[in-house]
Image (cartoon, helix red, strand yellow):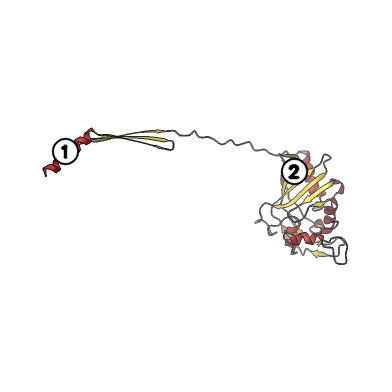
Amino acid sequence: AKPARQLLLLGSSMLSLFTASLSFQLPSLSYQYQSQASTSVIRCSATVSATIPPVVSATIPPVEMADAAHPLIQRANEILYSESGFYSPYNESAFSEDFVFRGPYIGPLNKQDYLSTMDTFKIHEAIPDISPNAFGFSIDPKDPNRVWFMVRNSGTATGELGLDRDGKLRVPGKGAVLDGCPETFSIIFDADRKVKYLSVGYVADRFEGNTNGKGAAVGIFHVIGLPFPSPGPLLKFAQWLPPPGGGPPALFPGK
């Protein structure tokens, strides 16, 4: 027993003379640990130094609102409601000679193709009370000649929708009620304030309305019950097909 007791006393004596120091570094925190031990007391001390990054508040730019009196916004609104060929008979002089139309399904169309297509469909006759219910007009910050806006078409199809230039292929609306989804439109004007470019039918929320997520004329076709090819080779091929008996393409004459 004596050797064991002596060994214990020797260990206690050595601990009383021993000082241990331990340092370690964590991200943004520095810790120092030191202990002293004796036969009766163990002392611990710790120091903590922390570097906390300053709180950076986000820079929030002011909200920019379009001026409703802006001449291009006023002109875009006029063309949309009374000169487009979609919501009303078209004004041919409102479109520049290098005009281009684009949509997710139809296009690109030049001026002749676009006006012929409007003559074919006659949307404003098929749905006499059609309205774009336009909202959210703004000027493109990168292109001061471009006006962006949203539409949500509405109306009742009490007339007939045209499918050919000669007016022989007509589809009755049968009183179908149009409740369109929100769509993004844009108009680019040239130096003479004629329409140089028109984009339509880009759906913002396909879950709204009763057009099955489709915009522009394609959404109207769906409401009336007229199937329309999905974007792809079939649709491109259909645009080039002549009607029975020959002549220009039935779907988009003038191509």
Which residue is more in the foreground, 238 or 179?
238
Secondary element at image label 2: strand
Tag 2 residue: 147
- Picture residue at 22% right of the left edge, 34% below the top: 16
Indicate the quadrant where residue 222 lies: bottom right
- Picture residue at 17% right of the left edge, 37% below the top: 10
Q: Amino acid at mark 1?
A: Leu
Q: Position of residue 84 (x, y in %)?
A: 81, 50
Is residue 214 depicted above or below 61 in this figure? below
- Picture residue at 13% right of the left edge, 42% below the top: 3
Q: Earlier in the sequence, mark 1 or mark 2?
A: 1
Left or right relative to 193: residue 137 = left
Tag 1 residue: 9
Indicate the quadrant where residue 165 lies: bottom right
Left or right relative to 34: residue 129 = right
Quadrant in which the N terminus is drawn: top left
Q: Amino acid at mark 2?
A: Val
Quadrant in which the C terminus is drawn: bottom right
How dense is the environment of label 2, judged by Cα within 10 Å: few (below 14), some, or many (20 and up)?
many
How dense is the environment of label 1, judged by Cα within 10 Å: few (below 14), some, or many (20 and up)?
few
Q: Position of residue 136 (x, y in %)?
A: 70, 45
Determine whether label 1 and label 2 are within 8 Å by CB.
no
Q: Nearer the viewer, mark 1 or mark 2?
A: 1
Q: Residue 180: which disc?
A: none
* Residue at the front extreme of this rendering: 3
Is residue 241 depicted above or below 33 in this figure? below
